[in-house]
Amino acid sequence: MSKKTPGVLTAVRHGRGGVKVAHHKNTAEMAIERMPVPNKVILPMQQHIGAPCTPIVKVGDTVAVGQKIGDSDKFISAPIHSSISGTVTAVGDVKLANGIITKGVTIESDGEMRLYEGIKPPVVTNKAELCAAVRESGLVGLGGAGFPAHVKLNIPEDKDIDTLIINAAECEPYITVDYRECIENAENILKGVEILKNILGFKQVIIAIEDNKPKAFEIMKEIADRDNDKGDAIKLMTLRSRYPQGAEKMMVLSATGRKVPPGKLPSDVGCVVMNVTSTAFIARYLETGKPLVSRSITVDGSAIAEPKNIRVPIGTNIQDIIDFCGGFKTEPRKIIFGGPMMGLAICSTEAPICKQNNAILAFDERKDLIKKERACIRCGRCVDVCPMSLTPTLIERYSRVKDAEKLKAINVNTCMECGSCAYACPSGRPLVQYIRLAKQVLREESGK
Amino acid sequence: MAKRLTVSASPHVRSSETTTGIMLDVILALVPALVMCAVYFGSRALVLTAVTVASCVISEFVCRKVMKRDNTLGDLSAVVTGIILAFNLPATLPLWMAAIGGIIAIVVVKQMFGGIGQNFVNPAMTARIILMVSFPTAMANWIASGQNAWEIDAITSATPMGQITEQLTEQIRDGVDFSLPEGLPSIAEMLLGKHGGSMGEVCSIALICGGFYLLLRKVISPIIPFFFIGTVAVFMFFAGGGNVDFVIYQLLGGGLMLGAFFMATDYATSPITKKGKIIFGIGCGLITSVIRIYGSLPEGVSFSIILMNILVPHIENLTLSKPFGFVKEKKEKKEVKA
């Protein structure tokens, strides 16, 4: 892909560090398939960052697709909606794939997928109405973070925001759903961009895609040019495919050259970053009023028989999803929600898929091999690759002796746990784990 | 059917680089020089190397066992130390002295401080200095290359660095303009190693090739070698009154190539920050040059590296980067003052 295509931007600034990981985008050319309706779904009340919801239905209730079944009165939260039609069979504790037990609603399908009759497109003319609508849709960051979108869009009046960045980087290996979104749903992405731009008043919109996705880029460019008659407010940008390019702070740096200070948000430097799939969803929601009840995920990994991109109802059992992909072709040793760099290893496939999960990766014995752990040799590779300019080897040292004062001095909380340090370490040291423990030490210290 | 799933912390992939792999690369980089050693000094050079390597490996094994710690021979760092130690010795050194050197390097300098990554000075360098101080005659028994080191009556010869330093000291003392001494090996001979010196320091071209291999494999960063060698070059250019030949002799002799590429770049004893590496390289270069010009020792490389090693923790403290997006809080200070 030519770097000097007219009308296309290249990154303003490159982040330091980062690592080159093998992309493994095996499912890139696979169109998203629809999974048949499951017999039942389990909807946990915590599928987002923030306060968990409380169920608003009880056992025996009949529910329909898109009907709200859980809500919270806290600000940083998002309601949960039923993803199938049927009967509520249980309201109680459910175990999530990460082992956490939370409240959840179990619904058995009546096979009809009836749409909730209360669904109608919302009327949105200003920011307050947009945020209220987005909240009602149950939208959380679909790139894997799970942050309630309405909170992000509810920009305080005193903050001067000029740039909307649409994150289509998808820097984690294996995952291709955002890429497929760009190819299959580009119209809605652009519609979502227009809505956000017009209502929230951004001066410029930058849609940023990594350079290992040329096809997506061409399609997006074609549509952007077509819609861009009012000047060049909407721009496309190519980014180096270097992990962790898709991290929020790295996106802001590449798109605008601005650095988000430690402990601050992109809105503090005038930017809002939205995942590309979340943006497309906003357009669909404003058109149809149908809340977040299903999402696309990539299923891949050496243990999966038929890797695919599929659209699944939220709350579908993981084992059912894997069976739809041909089941396991070899004995799985590690199953991950998300990508290999920052994903969560799960302990059971008898658990529901949640809103913020964008991939299921199953690996067999060979891929599970981790480097032999040796003593730190002070090679400095962790320092070289850290995108936040931290010193992981020192953090590890102080973490092991729980020295809170020294840990505070070396800015542990700036770490975004991207995993570049542990990836690069030749001695196979579990650096991210030590960093998490260090953050725990600081939390306990400040809690005293 | 219950599955045995590993639930471990992210990241779930790792790069293919390992500590053992890095050490192997260093060994490979030293092979050309090792071959040239054998060519110039005969089979004794290889025997001497085998003795130092065996001494290092056995010391590490025994020491770890006695200390009730895990066996770390698999990381191959003891082998690397053994080879580099051998390269710092004259080919005629009695084997038992070489063995003692290995024991000192591994047990005293490395294992007593915690093993790999924990030593505060370069093990091979320190062992060399201790041998030099303990057995000065044997350690100064440099023979001209091309001779059989087994022969007791192999002709000793002054190293080129020795010759230059002697001449220079006299000229500085007499206030005479600088000139190179007679009878130095030609520059080509310096590159290829046809002159006197320690085993590993003679064949400059083999060492430079090894150094470039390490740079290519990204085992070492170019910063330290560049600034170390560069500082010596600049210093010697002015010290020698603009005499380019003088600069070249200074760069190719006295173990500078061995020191700059293989010893100053040792991970445990060099700074982990880029800025720190620059300071370290320049410091080594300055101290080496000062010792060579104003001191009576023919080579300053060993001492300069040790002295800079000791400063590394302070250099690191001074050069740690601020985190991404760090903003200095200037305005608040002004308000407090008012």
Image: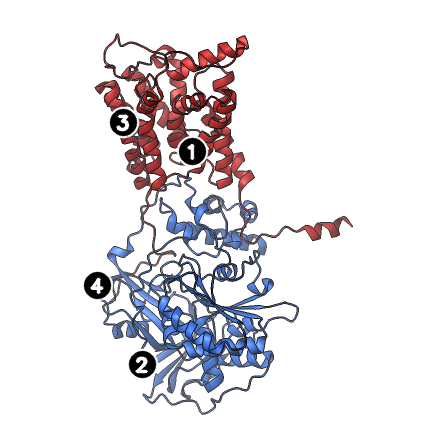
Chain colours: A blue, B red
Q: Tell me the tag on residue A433.
A: none
Percent coordinates x, y for residue B323 in the rendering: 54, 50
User: Foreground mark, 2 or 3?
Assistant: 3
Q: Quadrant of the N terminus of chain B?
A: bottom left
Q: Tell me the tag on residue A330.
A: 4
Q: Amino acid at mark 4?
A: Thr
- At label 2, counting other C-alpha atoms closer than 10 Å, the crowd grade (few under 14, some 14-19, many 20 or more) is some
* Residue that badge 3 annotates: B34
Q: CA distance from mark 2 to mark 3?
A: 68 Å
Tag 2 near tag 3, CB within 8 Å: no
In the rendered image, the vertical position of residue B171 relative to residue B319, given as above or below? above
Tag 1 near tag 2, CB within 8 Å: no
Tag 1 near tag 3, CB within 8 Å: no
Same-chain status of marks 2 and 4 = yes
> In the figure, residue A320 lies in which quadrant?
bottom left
* Residue drawn at 54 percent across, 61 percent down: A256
One can see residue B306 in this view: yes
Q: CA distance from mark 1 to mark 2?
A: 64 Å
Q: CA distance from mark 1 to mark 3?
A: 20 Å
Q: Chain of mark 2?
A: A
* Residue that badge 2 annotates: A38
Q: Amino acid at mark 2?
A: Pro
User: Foreground mark, 4 or 3?
Assistant: 3
Q: Amino acid at mark 1?
A: Pro
Same-chain status of marks 2 and 3 = no
- Which SS class for mark 3? helix
